Amino acid sequence: MRSDIQDNEKIKVKLFAILRERVGESEITITVPSGITVNHLNSEILKKYPQLKSFSNKFVTSVNCKVTTGDTVITSKDEVALLPPVSGG
Amino acid sequence: MLGLEDNSAGALSVFIGNVRNRGRSGNVSEIYYEAYSEMAEQEMREIEKEAQTKWGIKKLVAIHRIGNIKVGESSIIIGVSSEHRHEAFEACKYIINNVKTRVPIWKKEISRESQKWADGILLE
């Protein structure tokens, strides 16, 4: 019976710069099924925060301070962040 | 200067980046800088290591300010000492160029009329 129920995880996601401003928070929490990929997480974020849809190709996702590919699997222990184009210096 | 002196170093090169009064969106009175600090520090250390490997520099310092910085104030300072001037100049240039494209820092140009995030470069 237990196998029918998919475990959920709460993933905390840091937001910066224009993404932080559009959402109004520097960190959001997304509840997703265990074993979720970066691509899947991003589509869940865009569903929950449609104001970010116009930025969907204007950010990358970092996991534990490294930019990752869409098929990277995330757990609630990972530090996840959405990073818009950088402009330091 | 900046603790860069070294008896084996004959050259000391310093780059300072200042906030200027014109930006892409017009007049600028100040710039707000925001960083993902943990990742930015890791990436800065990585760039410094690369510069040290490439040019065998003796001592190095790289500091980026965050928060609101007014026109005429400095946002970044990079200092390098090396045996000869070529390595010091090249290492300084390498570090500032890579900070601009690889470190998660964002700037917003602020004027009396508007506030605008810079277009920037997507990290790879």
Image: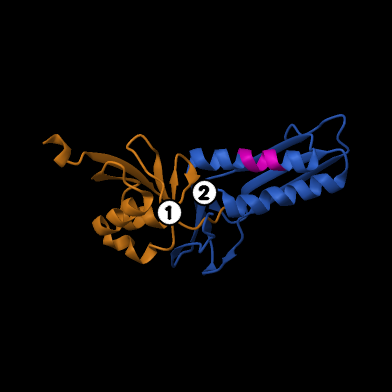
* Residue A53, x across and y down, in percent: 33, 64
Mark 1 vs mark 2: tell me if same chain: no
Viewer-proximal residue, A61 or A87? A61
- The residue at 51%/55% (across/down) is B107
**Circle 1 residues within 10 Å: few <14, some 14–19, many ≥20:** many
Residue at the spot of label 2: B104
Residue B95 in percent (x, y) is at 68, 48
Chain name for mark 1: A
Residue A5's place in the image compared with A53, above or below, is above
Residue extending farthest top: B7
Q: Amino acid at mark 1?
A: Ala
**Element type at marker 2?**
loop
Q: CA distance from mark 1 to mark 2?
A: 10 Å
- Please tell me the numbered disc located at residue B6: none
The image position of residue A11, as x and y in percent, is 30, 41
Chain letter, colour blue: B
Question: Which residue lies under the disc numbered 1?
Answer: A17
Q: Which residues are magenta?
A: B45-50
Residue type (three-letter) at the residue carrying disc 2 = Pro
Q: Quadrant of the N terminus of chain A?
A: top left
Asked which quadrant contains residue B80, the reply is: top right
